[in-house]
């Protein structure tokens, strides 16, 4: 694990402090107006222009989590939590890199240009000559001419927030952000339509097409032309209303007005579609407090025939105290994108007619395959495909269980509504109905947080027939009479079915997992004679299995899990056997005879990545970049692409093998799980190998797939530099710990040291730089800052931009 000297930590602390966004705190600026010809530059410490009272600031603000990207914006200067009320450019926002400039010109007003002078955004004044720019105490940035006439103002170009004294005319729009921290235009709008109606609607991104509103004030011309809405007014004292043609007001909220003298007040169209008013004490203490919002219940109000609702498909929406939506996947469903809690959910199991049918044709009963669990007070009102009545609750349940299209059944009165995937507009309801959600029965689980697999009952019946081999075994001959059939061979979930030999022909792409006897393997390895290697899990021997031809194999004699039951062991082995990826070592069979447990793998002729990368003669740069990408892809498969997430826990060059064509193949995956099962809950020992293990192992923190990302980061550096992560032999002690040294080189811009001036790597400096940056992101101390392995692959492949990583070792860390 990374370690560094105390003095280095002091240095890193200083660096860290320097990197803090200073612009947010630089408030000693005076309130001078901006005159034509002056400009502001986007840097970490550029001072904003303040309004006379100092309440509002105009300038560049750093994008969250983006070191060198800025928006031109207006924010509250006196309160600590930075609240942006306006930003330049709405679709898309004008993102400016460090060094970009905004200048005030007399003919075009504000002009924002990047470092190359390319125009990013402009206020575009058409009439009049601009003389100065003024940041007002209302939070309005104005461009005025010589006689202080306003030619342009930010209040006329609102983004997602309006402020007291701001008015929106017919045709005016507020657009939500994509997320709280992503200022790209989101899918929600607040509009005062040309007909006077104030509405909230979603749009079909990336177009502007507005869907049917989910809120409408009803102040349109058609309802009553004399009372239709002319403006949306946020008056000085903090009331928001639609002012009607006849001078009357349509208030958006009853009461709920706070003192605008003591409080900042704003109304924002949040990224989740809720338009809400908030206040914050001016004296600096406290935080934003919610006053009121529209619509009344966004979970219920967004209800279109098509579309997911405010939450993603298969998700369920509830409101929090501030009337904002919270989305949650139902039981046995998980988010497709774990970082997007408002996104779609997917079932943790496969459900499809093909599987059900196959299961049935093998003598199984679908009632053994699924459970219907009752989820209280939940409905997905737009996903019905049939209603059956008169039905009883039991008939409803059975009908859904036996129907491979049915994902949920709602029973109420005498009616049974069956619903299909994807489920949309999920919400909590207070109806007199019962919701039954169909889930695959869990016979066992693979990982603490992973999904689940299934062994149908029919398989268990075969237990006494101890030769469990697959028919259609190309590799292992024909003396077989029981089959494992893995549907959708690669990774669609697993689910095995047995079949008598004389039965139908079986999918040949299915897994050929053979159960060997101890004697067979003893013979194959010639009495465990030739040792190929030793690892945490046991010793590996070379062997030859005789079938119609001879197959060279690697036999791993496991040295643990004496206590584990036979069934659990087989389940785990089967899970490993179902992985099928170019960058993973194939499991061919196993032996399970009491104390003697062995795994039989394909034999790879070219040894380990360690022996290759740390050899005297380095592999070429091109080969190394391919190794790195291969390892990342193998891990991506383990983490995200097989039905059961597998966390490796011990990624290191010794566990990565090379085949005849120098493809890298990860080995030993799935074994950490076996090992952990063997330990009682309380004694979770550190898994993995010194130098590669993530800090959370030592901190009693949750172990997630990010531990592998950490180890991958270390391995990636080793591949880049062709040296071990810890090397006490080096002459310069700064270089002992590879991660520390690499960060130093990255920061100082001296990457050539890392590759020892290797010409091929330096000719490809862009890739080198990308790879180093990616590794720095992977070895971040905080697991949540590390990218997912999917992101890593994308970064290595160059399909997403790699930002400059922060220092991987925060100064407070206690490393060892
Ligand atoms: C800035 O502009 C405002 C509005 O035109 C004006 O009232 C004020 O006097 C100006 N302040 C300075 C210091 O020029
Ligand atoms: C913001 O969201 C858009 C659209 O989803 C995406 O393309 C963009 O990369 C995001 N920006 C950031 C900084 O995450
Ligand atoms: C329109 O509103 C005005 C004022 O509230 C009312 O006097 C008038 O009767 C309404 N007209 C219609 C057609 O409802
Ligand atoms: C703002 O509107 C509210 C409600 O209509 C009204 O009571 C208040 O007097 C208004 N304030 C100003 C300054 O006009
Ligand atoms: C700040 O203002 C609020 C209400 O305006 C008041 O309750 C609180 O005591 C004030 N705090 C300070 C530190 O002045
Ligand atoms: C479904 O979820 C329950 C608890 O939330 C869990 O016990 C069960 O194993 C899960 N089943 C499957 C098939 O994921
Ligand atoms: C699994 O997830 C839960 C909640 O998301 C977390 O509390 C727990 O620590 C995780 N366990 C592991 C082993 O990752």
Image (tube, helix red, strand yellow):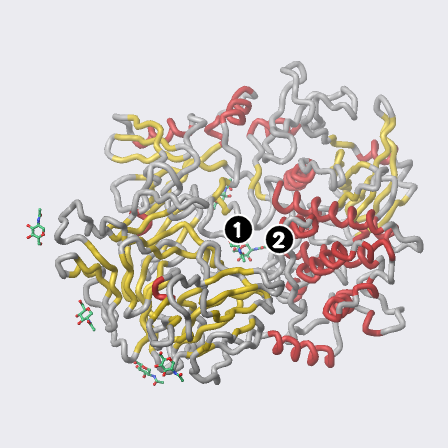
Name the residue at 62% across, 63% down: 116
Task: Out of 123 and 412, give the one closest to the viewer.
Answer: 123
The residue beneath circle 2 is: 788
Count of numbered tags = 2
Task: Out of 670 and 149, give the one closest to the viewer.
Answer: 149
Quadrant hosting residue 696: bottom right
Q: Dividing the image into 4 quarters, which one contains the C terminus?
A: bottom right
Residue closest to the far top: 502
Name the residue at 43% across, 79% down: 33
N-terminal label among 2 and 1? 1
Quarter of the rendered image showing ligand 1: bottom left
Image: 545 above or below 749: above
The residue beneath circle 1 is: 338
What SS does tag 2 mark? Answer: loop
Give residue 308's position: percent from left, percent from top: 40, 42
393 relative position to 764: left or right:
left
Task: Out of 711 and 247, give the one closest to the viewer.
Answer: 247
Give residue 775's position: percent from left, percent from top: 71, 59
């Amino acid at each position: 694990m990374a370690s560094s000297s105390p003095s280095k930590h002091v240095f890193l602390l200083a660096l860290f402090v320097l990197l803090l966004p200073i612009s947010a705190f630089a408030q000693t600026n005076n309130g001078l107006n901006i005159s034509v010809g002056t400009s502001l530059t986007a840097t970490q410490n550029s001072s904003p222009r303040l309004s006379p009272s100092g309440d509002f600031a105009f300038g560049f603000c750093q994008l969250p989590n983006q070191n060198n990207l800025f928006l031109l914006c207006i924010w509250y200067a006196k309160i600590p939590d930075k609240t942006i009320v306006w930003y330049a450019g709405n679709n898309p926002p004008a993102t400016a890199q460090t060094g970009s400039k905004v200048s005030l010109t007399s003919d075009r007003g504000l002009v924002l240009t990047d470092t190359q002078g390319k125009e990013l955004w402009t206020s575009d004044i058409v009439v009049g000559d601009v003389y100065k720019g003024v940041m007002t105490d209302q939070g309005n940035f104005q461009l005025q001419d010589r006689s202080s006439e306003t030619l342009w103002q930010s209040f006329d170009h609102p983004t997602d927030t309006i402020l007291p004294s701001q008015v929106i005319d017919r045709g005016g729009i507020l657009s939500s952000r994509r997320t709280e921290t992503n200022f790209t235009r989101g899918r929600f709008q607040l509009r005062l339509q040309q007909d006077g109606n104030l509405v909230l609607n979603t749009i079909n991104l990336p177009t502007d097409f507005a869907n049917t509103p989910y809120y409408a004030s009803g102040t349109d011309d058609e309802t009553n032309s004399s009372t239709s809405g002319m403006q949306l007014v946020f008056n000085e004292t903090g009331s928001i209303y639609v002012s009607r043609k006849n001078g009357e007001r349509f208030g958006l909220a009853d009461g709920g007005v706070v003192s605008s003298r003591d409080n900042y007040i704003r109304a924002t169209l949040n990224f989740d579609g809720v338009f809400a008013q908030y206040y914050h004490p001016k004296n600096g203490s406290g935080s934003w407090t919610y006053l009121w919002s529209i619509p009344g219940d966004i979970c219920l109000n967004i209800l279109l025939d098509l579309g997911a609702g405010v939450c993603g498909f298969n998700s369920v929406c509830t409101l929090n105290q501030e009337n904002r939506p919270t989305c949650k996947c139902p039981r046995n469903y998980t988010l497709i994108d774990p970082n997007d809690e408002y996104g779609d959910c997917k079932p943790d199991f496969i459900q499809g007619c093909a599987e059900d049918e196959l299961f049935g044709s093998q003598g199984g009963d679908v009632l053994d395959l699924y459970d219907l669990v009752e989820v209280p007070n939940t409905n997905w009102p737009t996903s019905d495909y049939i209603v059956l009545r008169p039905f009883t609750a039991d008939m409803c349940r059975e009908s859904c269980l036996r129907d491979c299209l049915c994902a949920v059944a709602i029973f109420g009165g005498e009616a049974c509504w069956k619903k299909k995937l994807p489920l949309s507009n999920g919400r909590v309801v207070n109806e007199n109905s019962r919701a039954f959600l169909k889930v695959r029965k869990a016979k066992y689980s693979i990982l603490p947080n992973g999904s689940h697999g299934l062994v149908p009952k029919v398989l268990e019946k075969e237990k006494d027939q101890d030769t469990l081999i697959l028919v259609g075994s190309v590799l292992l001959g024909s003396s077989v009479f029981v089959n494992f059939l893995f549907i959708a061979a690669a990774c669609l979930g697993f689910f095995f079915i047995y079949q008598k030999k004389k039965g139908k022909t079986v999918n040949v792409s299915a897994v050929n997992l053979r159960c060997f006897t101890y004697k067979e393997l003893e013979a194959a390895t010639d009495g465990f004679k030739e040792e190929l290697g030793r690892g945490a899990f046991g010793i590996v021997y070379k062997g030859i299995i005789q079938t119609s031809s001879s197959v060279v194999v690697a036999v791993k004699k496991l040295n643990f899990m004496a206590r584990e039951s036979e069934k659990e062991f087989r389940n785990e082995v089967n899970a490993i056997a179902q992985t099928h990826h170019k960058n993973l070592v194939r499991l061919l069979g196993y032996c399970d005879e009491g104390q003697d447990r062995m795994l039989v793998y394909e034999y790879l002729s070219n040894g380990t990545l360690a022996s290759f990368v740390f050899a005297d003669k380095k592999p070429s740069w091109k080969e190394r970049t391919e190794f790195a990408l291969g390892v990342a892809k193998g891990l991506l498969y383990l983490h995200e692409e097989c039905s059961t997430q597998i966390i490796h826990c011990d990624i290191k060059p010794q566990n990565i093998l090379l085949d005849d064509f120098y493809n890298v193949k990860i080995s030993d995956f799935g074994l950490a799980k076996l090992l952990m099962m063997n330990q009682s809950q309380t004694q979770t020992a550190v898994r993995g190998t010194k130098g590669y293990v993530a800090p959370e192992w030592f901190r009693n923190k949750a172990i997630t797939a990010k531990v592998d990302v950490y180890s991958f980061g270390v391995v990636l550096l080793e591949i880049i530099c062709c040296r071990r992560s810890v090397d006490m032999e080096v002459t310069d002690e700064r270089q002992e710990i590879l991660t520390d040294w690499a960060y130093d080189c990255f920061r100082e811009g001296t990457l050539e040291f890392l590759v020892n001036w290797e010409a091929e790597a330096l000719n490809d400096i862009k890739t080198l730089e990308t790879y180093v940056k990616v590794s720095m992101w992977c070895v971040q101390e905080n697991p949540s800052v590390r990218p997912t392995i999917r992101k890593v692959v994308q970064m290595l492949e160059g399909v997403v931009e790699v930002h400059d990583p922060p220092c991987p070792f925060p100064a407070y860390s206690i490393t060892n």
